[in-house]
Image (tube, helix red, strand yellow):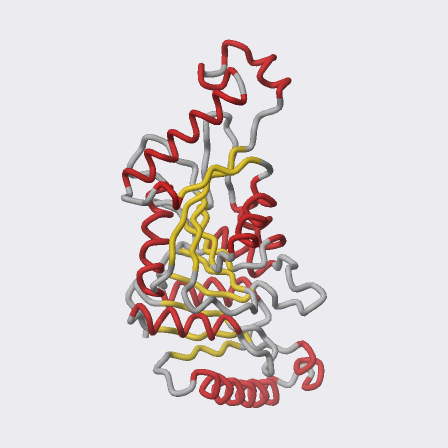
Amino acid sequence: MAQSHDGILVFLDRDLKAPQPALKKALLLAQASSLPLTVAVNADSPAMRRAVGGDEQRLEAAGQQIRTAWERRIEELAGGAVLETRVNVSKDVEESLRDTVKDCRPTLVVVHTSEEGTIKRHLFTPRDWMLIRRAPCAVLCVHSRPWSAVPRITMAVEPEEREDGLDATVFHAAQRWGDALQAELDAVHVLEHPDETLLLVAGEALPEYAASSANIRDYHRKALDQFAHRHQLDADKTHLLEGPISSTLAEYCEEHGSDILVVGTVRRNTFERLLLGATAEALLTRASNDVLVIKPDGFESDWSA
C-alpha cells in the first residue's frame, strides 16, 4: 500500500552485514517527527544470478531466500520499531529506485552515501546522483559518524529579497528537522568573488554593488542580515564566508561541528552562478557531515507519482 506524502523512506546498503547508518538515522528522524518509516533495499546479487544461471524457478527461490534474510536483518536493526519493509530483487537499479519512490511518495529519502567502503567512503555513487537530481523530495545523504547529543544543523543560503524563494524552503526544512531533533540552527552564505578581470570587462553591465569586492561583501552581508530578520534568526547565528563554495562549506561544518548541512539544489544569483545538483554532489565528496538536499517548490521530476 502506498503511503501518504509525508513519510520517510530509507534505502539500505546492499551488504546484508553492513551496519546501515542510514537506517539508524532514519529511525531517529521518524521517532522524533512521528512520521511513518519505510525501509527499502535492492537485494539483487550478481553472484546469485551467476550461480543459478537462467533457471527462472531457481532464481525465484533464491530471491525469496534473500528477501527472508533481509526482512530478518531489518527487524534486528529496527529493534522493534514499527515500519514497512520493501525488499526488491532487481537488476535495474534506476527502475528499482524510481518505482519505490513513486510508490511510497516520501517527504524525505535517507541514503548512506558511503556505500562503497572505507577507502572510498566519500565516493559519489550513481544512486546518490539519481536521488539528488530526480527524486521529487528532499534527500538526506548520511555518513557513518553519529549525530551529536544536541545536533547542529547548518543551512547554506543565498539570501535575496524574495520571501518565497528557495532560501525560505531551505530554512523551513532546516527548522522542521531542527525542531524534531531539538537541534541548534545556524545559517551561512558563501561569497565566491567573481574574477577581478570579469569586473573590469563587464564594467557598466554589472550592478552598482558589484563595483568592488568590498561593495559585494557589504551587499551580501546586508542581504544575510535581512534573511535573518525575516526568519527571526539571531544575527550571531548567521555567517558570511568567502571562498569556493563546496570546500568552504565543508571546512566550516568541520570546524564548527555541524552534523547536517542543508542545501538547495537549484540557485541562480546576479552573476548567473548555479547552485545545482553538482554543488550538492561535490559536497558529498568533501564533507564529513551529512548533507540534506532540498528541492525547490515546483520541482518537476519524472519520478513523481
Task: Identify the residue at horizontal 44%, vertical 25% (top origin).
Answer: 218
Q: Quadrant of residue 267?
A: top left
Question: Residue 251: horizontal and vertical position, in percent?
Answer: 59, 49
Q: Quadrant of the C terminus?
A: bottom left
Q: Quadrant of residue 162?
A: top left
Question: Residue 233: horizontal and vertical position, in percent?
Answer: 32, 45
Task: Identify the residue at horizontal 54%, vertical 66% (top origin).
Answer: 112
Residue 220 lies, with reference to residue 248, above or below; the image says above
Q: Nearest the camera: 179 or 132?
A: 179
Q: Nearest the camera: 217 or 293?
A: 217
Horizontal relation, residue 10 to residue 81: left or right? right
Task: Identify the residue at horizontal 52%, vertical 32% (top origin).
Answer: 273
Question: Residue 190: horizontal and vertical position, in percent?
Answer: 51, 38
Question: Residue 145: horizontal and vertical position, in percent?
Answer: 55, 68
Task: Identify the residue at horizontal 39%, vertical 56% (top origin).
Answer: 137
Horizontal relation, residue 148 to residue 286: left or right? left
